[in-house]
Image (cartoon, rainbow, N blue to C red):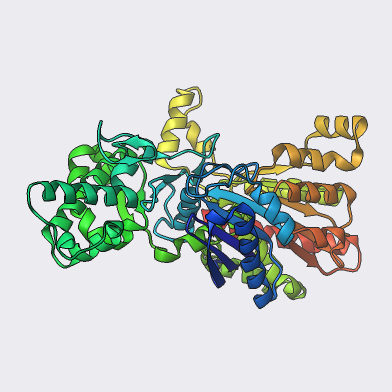
Amino acid sequence: MHILGFDIGGTKTAAVLAEINDGIKIVGKKQIQTETAFGLENSLERIKKIGHGLLDENNVKIAAVGVSCGGPLDSVKGLILSPPNLPGWDNVPICEIFSGEFGADCFLQNDANACALAEWKFGAGKGADDVVFLTMGTGFGAGVISGGKLLTGPNDLFGEIGHLRLAKDGPVGFGKAGSIEGFCSGGGIARSMAAYTRAKEAIGIKTAWLKDGLQESDWDVLHLSKYAADGDADAIKIFEAAGEKLGEAVSMVIDAFNPHLVVIGSIFVRCEKFLRPAMEKTLASETIPLSLAACKVVPAACGESLGDYAAVTVAAEALGADCSNKSAEAFEHVLPVYESLFSRYPALATIRQPLADAFKVLYGCYSSGGKLLICGNGGSAADSTHIVGELMKGFLKKRNLSDKVKNDIDIAFDGRIENASHYFQRSLPAIDLTGAVSLSTAFLNDVHPEMVFAQQTFGYGKPGDVLLCISTSGNAKNAVNAALTAKALKLKTIALTGGNGGELGKICGVSIRVPGKNTPEIQEYHLPVYHTLCAMLEEAFF
């Protein structure tokens, strides 16, 4: 699968083409000056051009477009809402524009959230459930991952800590004097450098950069870091002051969100050695000790390529694609279970790849807190119920609860059932859409019989969930309609069929087509296939 990403900034815009296949690989990139001074339409046309250039050079069809851009914006409606670094970009329906231009769904996210996703999926935050990413670039914002979910808020402004005030007076950032952005962003540090330079000059002392004739337009973090690297005391002192304020900001983050990890980008990546000592000293004095002990503060691992990965991850996350390579690692772990199917049923060798793909899709779903919806008719309805039974309780292994959960359950039951927690098992959430008799019969009688599974998919399904449609022919109309509904809701889909896969084989992202000359033979092969899939998932998670 290929994704086209756009990292839109006030100065530069990059178009990136990436291949998603058990991880992410950037296969092409083009970059231009955004040139906002020449108007919105000029910028958009030039951005479209570099996107088409990448697609033409690589001759691929894309699954989606991702856009990372500074806020404010509306990620749900796909609107860019007058960012300060993009003058004239007022209520721009960027997703509608790019969807029409490139023939694929487009997804938008603010740059802090996009970078948080990228660092969490395959950067410094990989493997952690609670991560806060701090931009620390031209501005200062945050993207927050909590419990394995990106938090956005109703206006996509969750984590805008740059607006919080650290001092009554100080450099202006985010429209507020003394704000975190005023002290810790690139612009803020540059303003602090200017104020420091003038204060020294007022008492008759010239800084090294003033003696060197460095123009005031070049009083910035880049030049300051060069002086600091040469051991200049004034440059080091300015960085120490910024590091102290950064420590105050990070302390607020740790106290408020209790994350496993705080990842800081841009300036911190390049200037960590000048900022960290003062930051850590402040953290030690300001932060709740237990929270600080549980958290690491690290530079972004994606480095200068973070914006490229962020733009692609916006779309990959919306599609439920696995960028982190975790599913591939999990698949290696369950290989013995997988291979046992083909040693027992050599005729199923034709489904080796789709079965592996189905496992990876479901592993990604469950890793992200999603659920499985299943539908089928007749014998396939019985299979739907059967699968739910294997996933919602122990199948081949004991699924023991953690001591904390056991304790919580026993306290709740309060002796009404002795050792109540003993009777619970961990589950992989799955819903059989064939089992809701009252809902199904009412809907097929009052509304439309062929939409009975589609309605339940619409009601239960959330992005990140998976729909499994079982049909020996692949043409069951109620299952086909459910698959189309799942596609509209951005759910991943798996078809378990026979023959040529029918309509479901064309619609679903993964199509497992077993051999068999007739319905009974196909159903006989379906059983060991889904038993193996359930056993692989159980082995991976328990």
Is 500 located above or below residue 97 in the figure? Answer: below
Q: Nearer the viewer, residue 290 or 202?
A: 202
Residue in front for this viewpoint, 86 or 377: 86
* Residue drawn 69% across the image and 53% down it: 97
Residue 164 position, x and y percent, is 35, 35
**Residue 132, percent from left and from top:** 40, 47
Residue furthest left in the image: 204
On the question of residue 182 being in view, the answer is yes
| Point 78% across, 59% down: residue | 496
Vertically, is 495 above or below 1?
above
Residue at the (39%, 59%) spot, across then down: 124
Give the quadrant of the N terminus.
bottom right
Q: Is residue 185 visible?
A: no
Is 304 rendered above or below residue 81?
below
Nearer to us in this view, 58 or 184: 184
Q: Is residue 526 left or right of residue 166?
A: right
